[in-house]
Image (cartoon, helix red, strand yellow):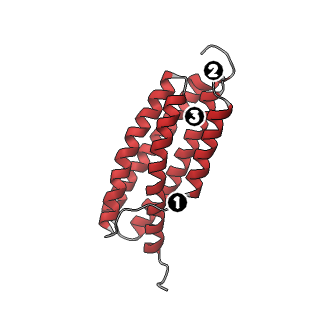
């Protein structure tokens, strides 16, 4: 059995987030259709578009390390998406639906921030400067999306969830 090195761990984690990004794109489409707030629908649409660019950057990183782009099942993102589906089922038509969807979207963001931050750090350790740049670009986008979602929650969505006019 080959030694398990940081290179190996980097590649395995890259496969994890590659799978996750594909699942996230599908979940965002469904969340966008389900959301009630036009602002939240727009946020989901923007994130879905960003996700496609992020997926393409991941393909570039795979090329840089000489590996075929492929995913491996990410149990964490499967769980987060499953929770989002529960929210869509249990809160459909209620004032709290959008708050639940937004919270699920932020759980996705926090997972992505964690993964991209780790991958960026490992890429730096491995001397993969081009990969660091690509991963940092995605990390910055994920952080900005999280901030936008927080602002949307605090300005509109959470108030509407209480059943009060925004």
Q: Nearer the viewer, mark 2 or mark 1?
A: 1
The label on residue 160 is 2
Q: Which residue is mark 3?
A: 102
Residue 101 x/y as whole percent: 59, 34
Residue depicted at x 53% and y 54%: 114
Residue at mark 1: 73
Residue 40, disc: none
Q: Residues within 10 Å of mark 3 (few under 14, many from 20)?
A: many
**Residue lying at the far front of the rendered structure:** 89
What percent of the width, then of the height, locates residue 14? 44, 62
Q: CA distance from mark 2 to mark 1?
A: 36 Å
Report helix, strand or loop for mark 3: helix
Q: Considering depth in this image, is 144 or 63 the residue closer to the camera?
A: 63
Label 3 close to label 2 by CB (< 8 Å):
no
Residue lying at the far top in this picture: please name it: 165
Residue occupying the point 39% across, 65% down: 124
The quarter holding residue 52 reads: top left
């Amino acid at each position: 059995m080959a030694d398990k090195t940081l290179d190996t761990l980097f590649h395995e984690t890259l496969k994890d987030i590659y799978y996750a990004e594909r699942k996230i794109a599908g979940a965002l489409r469904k969340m966008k259709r389900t959301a009630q707030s036009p602002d939240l629908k727009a946020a989901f649409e923007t994130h879905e578009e960003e996700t496609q660019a992020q997926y393409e950057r991941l393909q570039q990183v795979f090329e840089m390390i000489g590996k075929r782009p492929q995913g491996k099942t990410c149990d964490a993102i499967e769980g987060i998406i499953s929770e989002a589906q529960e929210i869509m089922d249990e809160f459909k038509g209620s004032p709290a639906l959008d708050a639940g969807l937004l919270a699920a979207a932020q759980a996705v963001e926090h997972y992505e921030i964690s993964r991209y931050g780790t991958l960026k750090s490992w890429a730096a350790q491995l001397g993969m400067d081009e990969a660091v740049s690509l991963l940092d670009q995605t990390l910055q986008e994920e952080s900005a999306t999280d901030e936008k979602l927080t602002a949307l929650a605090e300005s509109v969505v959470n108030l509407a969830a209480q059943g009060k006019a925004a």
